Amino acid sequence: MNTQTKKLFKSVSLVGAIVIALTGCATKQSPAPSPVNTAANTPAATTASSNLLETIKKNGKIRIGLMGTYAPYNFLNDKKEVDGFDADVAKQVAKRIGVQAEFITGEFSGLIEGLQKDKYDALISQVTITDDRKKTMDFSTPYIKNSVSIVVKADNTTIKSLEDFKGKKIGVGLGTNDEKYLREVALPKVGNFEIPTYNDVITSLTDLNVGRIDATINNMFAIQPLVEKNNFKIKAVGQPIKEDFAGIAIRKNNQELLDALNKALADMKTDGTFKEIFKKWFGVDPTI
């Protein structure tokens, strides 16, 4: 190795030593951060906030969605207060949970969407329990059974059964299980007929009374007060075409609330409160 090469080697060695020394100093001056304790940084309220029942109790109220236009189930009385069978059931259920019932009215076609968007905590508005609806919401045990009949003008002699719907105009509530029945069961069975839809029962009965539609399907318990109040000349014909069961509908994955609702309904039936409410509005003993 010549003299020049030796000098170059010494210079490279010196630079290397300096880099190593500096690196060592940097490591000592900047110690690695301590591991993050994710459990300690997770808000303690996360689990509790996901429990809708606890939220309802904390707020002191349960937001109940209903139509408010479907007497005697739910309607606005002379004082513009929500009243009716559903309303009385809702008040009792809320009381047994330990809160007040806050009623929020809306057209039936928007109630289910409103429930999913957290506008309501529960729907108590004759929401029929169906397999399709069970995919997107949970239901309490049924609290009423309804028989659905064909309703026509009093002087109508051409419609006596489902088979007579062909070529006719059969009105029905928009977004209801009755609409689904007409489209998916009646149409394929009897042939083509027109299905005008309505946002409230009174309008459909008015159209039936003046002959704009040929028939509708509904529960006679539900429409009788409107028939009497407005002196509609209409009647039910034939045997009921189907029976439905209604329950309290809530968003999925709220088991604590569902359990509380079911317990409240069961206790109401056990102590006679449910029977009192049913007889108050329908004049007969409960059908379920």
Image (spheres, helix red, strand yellow):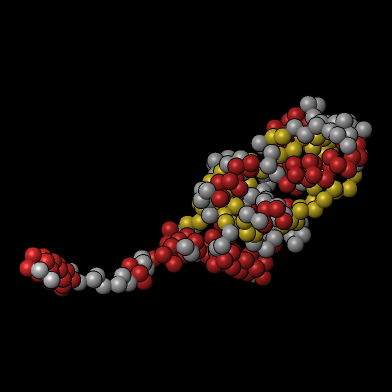
Q: Quadrant of residue 161?
A: top right
On the image, the x and y values in percent for residue 49 come to 43, 62
Along the line of sight, the residue nearer the viewer: 120 or 29: 29
Name the residue located 81 percent from the left edge and 26 percent from the top edge.
Answer: 211
Q: Is residue 75 visible?
A: no
On the image, the x and y values in percent for residue 176 come to 70, 44
Looking at the rendered image, the quarter that the C terminus falls into is bottom right
Where 43 falls versus 123 (above or below)?
Answer: below
Residue located farthest toward the front when viewing the structure as drawn: 2
Where 182 falls versus 261 (above or below)?
Answer: above
Q: Is residue 267 visible?
A: yes
Q: Quadrant of residue 108?
A: top right
Name the residue located 69 percent from the left edge and 59 percent from the top edge.
Answer: 143
Where 152 falls versus 124 (above or below)?
Answer: above
Along the line of sight, the residue nearer the viewer: 228 or 122: 122
Along the line of sight, the residue nearer the viewer: 187 or 231: 187
Along the line of sight, the residue nearer the viewer: 266 or 78: 266
On the image, the x and y values in percent for residue 90 come to 58, 56
Q: Relative to 1, is 282 on the left or the right?
A: right
Looking at the rendered image, the quarter that the N terminus falls into is bottom left
Name the residue located 24 percent from the left edge and 70 percent from the top edge.
Answer: 33
Q: Relative to 186, is 86 on the left or the right?
A: left
On the image, the x and y values in percent for residue 263 come to 61, 69
Q: Relative to 261, is 244 on the left or the right?
A: right
